Amino acid sequence: MSRHPAPEELLLDYAAGTLPDGPALAVALHVALDPDSRRMVDRLNAVGGALIEREAEAALDEAALDSVLARLDGVAVEPRAQAPVRPPGFDWAPAPLVPHLRPGMGWRRILGMFDEIRLDLPGSFHRVSLLRLEPGHGLPQHKHAGYEYTVCLQGGYTDETGNYGVGDFAVGPGEHRHEPIADPGEPCIALIVVEKPIVLTGPWGRFFNPLVKRGLI
Amino acid sequence: MLSADEAADLIEAIALRQDRVAFAALFRHFAPRVKAFVMRGGTDADTAQEVAQEALVMVWRKAASFDRTRASAATWLYTIARNKRIDLLRRSARPIDTEDWLAVYAPEAEDADKSVLAGQTYTRVKELLVGLSEDQLVVIQKAFFEDKTHTVIAEELKLPLGTVKSRIRLALGRLREALEKDET
């Protein structure tokens, strides 16, 4: 059971399909790792199913069925879905992350402080990254202009709001400054989805904010 | 009408023997409902029909991955239609079908509590929806069907955002409590 589940309203938006891609990926990873949230999403999907079943039928002529039937000759019934194959080095990746990984994707060291893999979600308004922190290491103190979503995927980290382990979810307008530090043990890996470029508030800020604004780091 | 068991049988018939008669029966039941569901979001009839047709083609493709112990047919169809709606409405260069990553539960992530039968959850959810107050049902319906943010819902209902959020929370809380009581 997760100590920090995603808020239920966010699970509702996820089940309703109204979240933008970045936050939707963050929730998908949380849901894959957290049985309680998974059950809540199952229930919300059942609400969707029940609402569809209650729906009155919209007019749809037989020609619509005929054209789909004609297409089926060229469409195979696919074998049962198998567990996804993870590229080497990504054994920790929850299933919904796997389609976003490319062979040869590697960690990039940033500011000598942490490692990053920037994920490419075409058309996304969010910056979506995997971050890796060595135990005892932290991210530079920062705050956010917009919403930030974090899911812990390996290890754990601690900041002013608490301690986060695998599957834990954090969301919030980053008005308060925070400075996550990786817990002892394995390196901490997290997916971070940020609405707008973050603003560094510590002594490093003066140097790095111009780079942040240009999307270089 | 099509019962939940009948619908599940039809999907399994597609998986087992590419049964086109079963597909046609599923199509006749669900395609008009999916179309109506998508039109509620303000989508024009032609696009909504395309979503419905594409969703049913996806049902054909993915039939072998349907697991009646995990989700009722209507629930499964809902998730497929939702994902198709996302893909078709955005129409951006998406290299990955939403179906392939959003809400896909890895077969490896078997739930220990699978004994909670999905069919029961679905039947109970249907009953619970009837028991919700009109206020609560409206916000849930809008959140699901109309593809709107809570802020837009608040504007439409001429309610403060906080009120919409607390109604959604209340409705979700009622659903969760009732289902958890059943499951223990």
Image (cartoon, coloured by chain):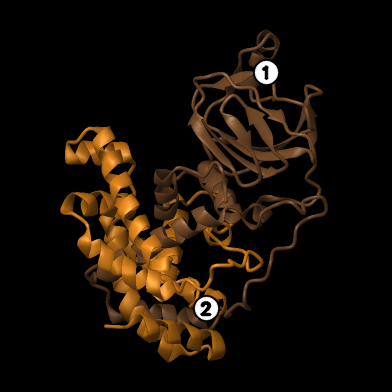
Q: Quadrant of the C terminus of chain B?
A: bottom left
Mark 1 neighbour density, 10 Å: few (under 14) some (14–19) many (20 or more): few
Vertical placement of residue A107 versus B43, above or below:
above
Q: Considering only vertical position in the picture, is B14 above or below A7?
A: below
Chain whose colour in the figure is orange: B
Residue underneath mark 2 = B63
The percent coordinates of residue A143 (x first, y second) are 56, 20
Mark 2, secondary structure of its residue: helix
**Quadrant of res B113:** bottom right
Q: Distance between the Cα atoms at labels 1 and 2?
A: 48 Å
Task: Give residue A85's position: percent from left, percent from top.
Answer: 74, 62
Q: Amino acid at mark 2?
A: Ala
Q: Nearer the viewer, mark 1 or mark 2?
A: 2
Of residues A5 and B4, the one nearer the viewer is A5
Q: Which residue is mark 1?
A: A211
Where is residue B144? Give x, y as percent: 33, 54
Q: Is residue B146 left or right of residue A146?
A: left
Chain in brown in the render:
A
